Image: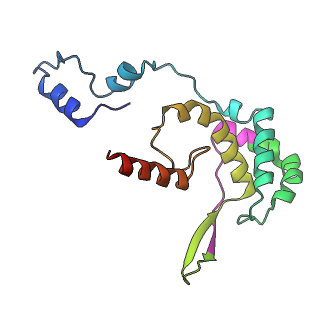
């Protein structure tokens, strides 16, 4: 959580030359732990947890359900299972060692109704699988700390809800 500018200015103004902050306001790195009560020793996500069988199975299921186009390697979601049977152990080792490198992104231009095009970047299905597995482990840790006013790329939130919230703020005069 961040303190507002007025509090930050007041805290900075009350700091003595020797660095003591006698105003009672948390500053800098103290803000997060002082206000939220969180400690620095929070749970971490290991690559072992990411590549855990149950997590990978759920990630696989979500990637296959989402379908999507093949990436630069032309591997489709239908081809993913046999590919993983042959290559998963090597992938797991390279992920654990930190040596895994994602493949290039395939560029796809989608025509828009006004005649322009929208460029999409399509990762390989293997990279989507790994991204999904990482997101499944990270989201429960970071999501609770995001602003309630944030709607972009958040679970169960969308652009329409952001518009509705903005309209509500306008009506209320905030």
Residue 3 location in percent, x, y? Answer: 30, 31
Residue 143 location in percent, x, y? Answer: 55, 35
- Residue extending furthest toward the left: 17
Q: Which one is nearer the viewer's eye here, 17 or 96?
A: 17
Residue 86 location in percent, x, y? Answer: 87, 49
- Residue extending furthest toward the bottom: 115
**161 in magenta:** no
Q: Which one is nearer the viewer's eye here, 2 or 87?
A: 2
Q: How many marks?
A: 0
Question: Left or right: where does residue 9 sit relative to residue 80?
Answer: left
Residue at screen point 76% across, 47% down: 62
Question: Left or right: where does residue 168 sit relative to residue 133?
Answer: left
- The residue stretch that appears in magenta: 92-109
Q: How is the image coloured?
A: rainbow
In the image, residue 17 above or below residue 162? above
Q: Which one is nearer the viewer's eye here, 158 or 122?
A: 158
Residue at screen point 56% across, 45% down: 154
In the image, residue 70 above or below residue 52? below
Residue at screen point 47% across, 38% down: 148
In the image, residue 137 above or below residue 39? below
Residue 12 lies in quadrant = top left
Quadrant in which the N terminus appears: top left
Residue at screen point 34% across, 32% down: 2
Quadrant in which the C terminus appears: top left
């Amino acid at each position: 959580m961040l303190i507002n500018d007025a509090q930050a200015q007041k805290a900075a103004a009350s700091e003595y030359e020797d660095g003591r902050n006698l105003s009672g306001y948390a500053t800098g790195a103290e803000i997060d732990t002082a206000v939220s009560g969180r400690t620095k020793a929070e749970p971490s996500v290991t690559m072992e947890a990411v590549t855990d069988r149950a997590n990978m199975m759920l990630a696989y299921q979500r990637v296959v359900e989402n379908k999507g186009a093949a990436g630069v390697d032309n591997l489709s979601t239908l081809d993913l299972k046999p590919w993983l049977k042959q290559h998963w152990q090597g992938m797991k080792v390279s992920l654990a060692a930190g040596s895994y490198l994602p493949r290039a992104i395939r560029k796809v231009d989608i025509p828009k109704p006004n005649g322009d095009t929208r460029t999409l970047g399509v990762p390989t299905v293997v990279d989507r699988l790994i991204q999904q597995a990482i997101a499944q482990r990270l989201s429960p840790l970071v999501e609770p700390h995001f602003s309630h006013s944030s709607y972009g790329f958040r679970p169960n939130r969308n652009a329409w809800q952001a518009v509705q919230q903005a309209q509500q703020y306008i009506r209320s005069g905030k």
